[in-house]
Image: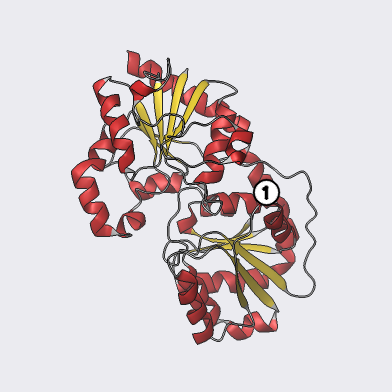
């Protein structure tokens, strides 16, 4: 198949799609004839090491007609993301040329996500994006929970295939003896990532965390002044002996942080399919997660950690249970690694190829 991938990635290492999209395209290129058009002028040498990509430095006009044959009229277009007005020109051309397309919405449609910047999204949907989603050949959800939280009002045609991961070669989890070193690595988006819920839960069980020598290291770049608000919360709750706030870590430094930690924490209100969590699992880190991560069912089914609802009381209870079951950390570590092996990129590319063929055959009938 001739497949055109369209994205608007900026190359920020702290956002999951900047990691997952190039790797998914690389894996798919082993099976299909692909062309990746990232519709801005971002230059990223790391992406070019993974797979060939094209930007507006190569094709200044954002148009199908400006692309080489056969990608000026491909068999299928994959839009990586939803709320991106620069997509519009290509979308209108796809409608005019009757080219089928799929949208990987990446957590944009669930009710919690729609509540974030509600007014802006209401008008964006009204003007254009509801029609964009409705006319798609299918919506590609990354998890069962993302689909369930989105519903079929957007488009009744959908399929569910997760993100992938490259499994590290080394695994050496050691059961912690002198306290528990927990870690979160990701964006400091307080609302989406539920960092306010995490801090409030820690505040309510502060003596328990201190007596068990639990520390939580938060790593991530500042997002719209979020770090200042997080520092204020840490200070107001007097959590300085438990929680530390650090700059973002990437590549080898991130690997070192993960290998030196005992537990991964993600208390998100909503996600697509969080690469940070999948990566932590691939390092054998047991994880304490909320249902908003969209991976709570998998973590629970594989016994790879502890699961909470998206509220303070439930997160607090999950911490208490984790401490009561700390002797299970080694077992849950092995289960975490086993869960991560389900997300091998090459396997996912084969599954995706079959789904694309199925959709193409149905489209041509």
**Can I make out residue 323 in this image?**
yes
> In the rendered image of this protein, does residue 301 appear above or below residue 263?
above
Residue located 48% across and 25% down the image? 35
Residue 6: horizontal and vertical position, in percent?
42, 33
Residue located 75% across and 59% down the image? 330
Asked where in the image residue 5 lies, by quadrant, the reply is top left
> In the rendered image of this protein, does residue 8 appear above or below residue 208?
above
Residue located 35% across and 58% down the image? 112
Residue 180: horizontal and vertical position, in percent?
71, 71
Residue under numbered circle 1:
282
Number of residues whose C-alpha sits closer than 10 Å to that of mark 1, classed few (under 14), some (14–19) or many (20 or more):
many
Considering depth in this image, is 53 or 81 the residue closer to the camera? Answer: 53
Considering depth in this image, is 145 or 363 the residue closer to the camera? Answer: 363
Residue 71: horizontal and vertical position, in percent?
42, 20
Residue 275: horizontal and vertical position, in percent?
56, 49
Asked where in the image residue 260 lies, by quadrant, the reply is bottom right
| Residue at the limit of the structure toward the top, as seen here | 365
> In the rendered image of this protein, does residue 208 appear above or below residue 21?
below
Residue located 78% across and 57% down the image? 173
Residue 350 relative to residue 294: left or right: right
């Amino acid at each position: 198949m001739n497949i055109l991938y369209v994205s608007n990635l900026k190359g920020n290492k702290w956002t999951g799609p900047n990691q997952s999209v190039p790797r998914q395209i690389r894996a798919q290129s082993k099976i299909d004839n692909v062309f990746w058009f990232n519709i801005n002028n971002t230059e990223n040498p790391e992406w070019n090491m993974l797979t060939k990509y094209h930007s507006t430095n190569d094709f200044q006009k954002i148009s199908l007609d400006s692309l080489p044959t056969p990608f000026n009229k491909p068999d299928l277009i994959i839009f990586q993301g939803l709320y991106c007005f620069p997509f519009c020109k290509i979308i209108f051309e796809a409608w005019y040329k009757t080219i089928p397309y799929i949208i990987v919405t990446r957590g944009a449609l669930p009710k919690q996500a729609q509540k974030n910047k509600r007014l802006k999204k209401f008008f964006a949907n009204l003007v254009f994006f509801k029609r964009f989603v409705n006319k798609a050949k299918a919506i590609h959800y990354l998890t069962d929970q993302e689909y369930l939280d989105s519903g079929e009002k957007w488009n009744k045609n959908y399929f569910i295939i997760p993100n992938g991961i490259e499994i590290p070669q080394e695994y050496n989890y050691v059961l912690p003896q002198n306290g528990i070193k927990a870690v979160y690595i990701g964006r400091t988006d307080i609302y989406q990532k539920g960092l306010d819920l995490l801090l409030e839960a820690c505040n309510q069980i502060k003596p328990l965390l201190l007596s068990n020598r639990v520390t939580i290291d938060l790593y991530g770049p500042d997002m719209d002044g979020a770090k200042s608000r997080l520092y204020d919360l840490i200070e107001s709750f007097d959590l300085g002996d438990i929680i530390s706030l650090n700059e973002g870590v990437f590549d080898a430094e991130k690997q070192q942080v993960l290998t030196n930690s005992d537990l991964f924490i993600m208390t998100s209100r909503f996600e697509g399919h969080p690469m940070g969590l999948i990566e932590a699992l691939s390092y054998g880190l047991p994880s304490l997660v909320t249902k908003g991560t969209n991976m709570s069912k998998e973590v629970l089914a594989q016994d790879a950690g502890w699961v909470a609802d998206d509220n303070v009381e439930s997160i607090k209870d999950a911490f208490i249970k984790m401490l009561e079951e700390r002797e299970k950390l080694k077992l849950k570590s092995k289960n975490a690694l086993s869960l991560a092996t389900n997300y091998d990129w090459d396997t996912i590319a084969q599954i995706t190829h079959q789904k694309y063929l199925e959709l193409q055959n149905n489209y041509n009938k």
